[in-house]
Amino acid sequence: EIVLTQSPGTLSLSPGERATLSCRASQSVTSSYLAWYQQKPGQAPRLLIYGASSRATGIPDRFSGSGSGTDFTLTISRLEPEDFAVYYCQQYGSSSITFGQGTRLEIK
Amino acid sequence: QVQLQESGPGLVKPSETLSLTCAVSGYSISSGYYWGWIRQPPGKGLEWIGNIHHSGSTYYNPSLKSRVTISVDTSKNQVSLKLTSVTAADTAVYYCARCGGRNSSFGPWGQGTLVTVSS
């Protein structure tokens, strides 16, 4: 199975700053079949990005995804207070879907 | 607007079978898409359990395949999960979600239901 490693484990930033989250795969992800999710405490994950760079319906344009092969990035251009949460990447390019372990984005 | 709602026992004894149902509203399962189950142990990350198509085709996580059965009831517009021989390691919040394809991203998600395995 493809193992996804997210870094950093925790990212401490202030509102208005730019956040860059990384997701590295143990092998190439077919056709950039990679998604990003946001999860707030006590809530279900919410799809942000699919296909590595396509924003899901209703997702603000401050969220953007990039990358291919084994290296993928989620960027939040200017952090809003509601953006502080845990973020997961997910690959669906292989027959067995896997998730990264998550990056916690906290207020500095 | 598609909505998903998980339900089932919140407490299951070790070695018994965990059974959950996901009721879908605002969309007919028969119209298409895949439907998946994902779980999250308390304080930990997400683990994919499996997906099902309205036709009944299923795809499971290899690590759980021997214990998992996912089924669909189009007349009730719901998807079900059974996990046999549970242990404490199966304690988690269980989510159902719509999946864009056999292998795809998930959205929307249900609110999740906590299942605790304990005697």
Image: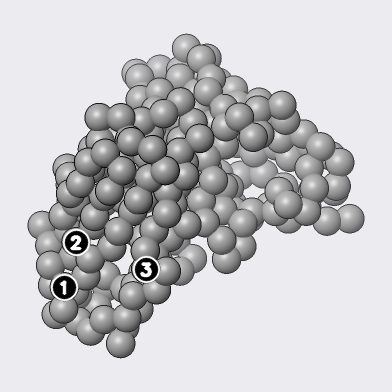
Q: Chain of mark 3?
A: A
Question: Could you say where residue A67 lies in the image, as x and y percent from the top left?
Answer: 20, 46
As drawn, the label of residue A30 is none
Do marks 2 and 3 share a chain? yes
Residue toward you, B41 or B27: B41
Q: CA distance from mark 2 to mark 1?
A: 7 Å
Q: Which residue is mark 1?
A: A18
Q: Is residue A68 left or right of residue B93?
A: left
The answer to whether the residues at label 3 and label 1 have Cβ atoms under 8 Å apart is no
| Residue at mark 2 | A75
Question: Image check: B77 left or right of A24?
Answer: right
Asked whether the beta carbons under mark 2 and mark 1 sit within 8 Å of each other, the answer is yes
- Residue A64 in the image: x percent, y percent? 16, 55
Badge 2 amino acid? Thr
Most extreme residue toward the top is B55
Callout 1: helix, strand or loop? loop
Q: Nearer the viewer, residue A60 or A104?
A: A104
Q: Chain of mark 1?
A: A
* Nearest to N terminus: mark 2 or mark 3: 3
The residue carrying mark 3 is A8
Looking at the rendered structure, the kind of residue marked 3 is Pro
Give me the residue at 57% from left, 27% from top. B60
Of label 3 and label 1, which has the lower sequence position?
3
The amino acid on which the numbered mark 1 sits, given as a three-letter code, is Arg
Label 2 and label 3: CA atoms lie apart by: 13 Å
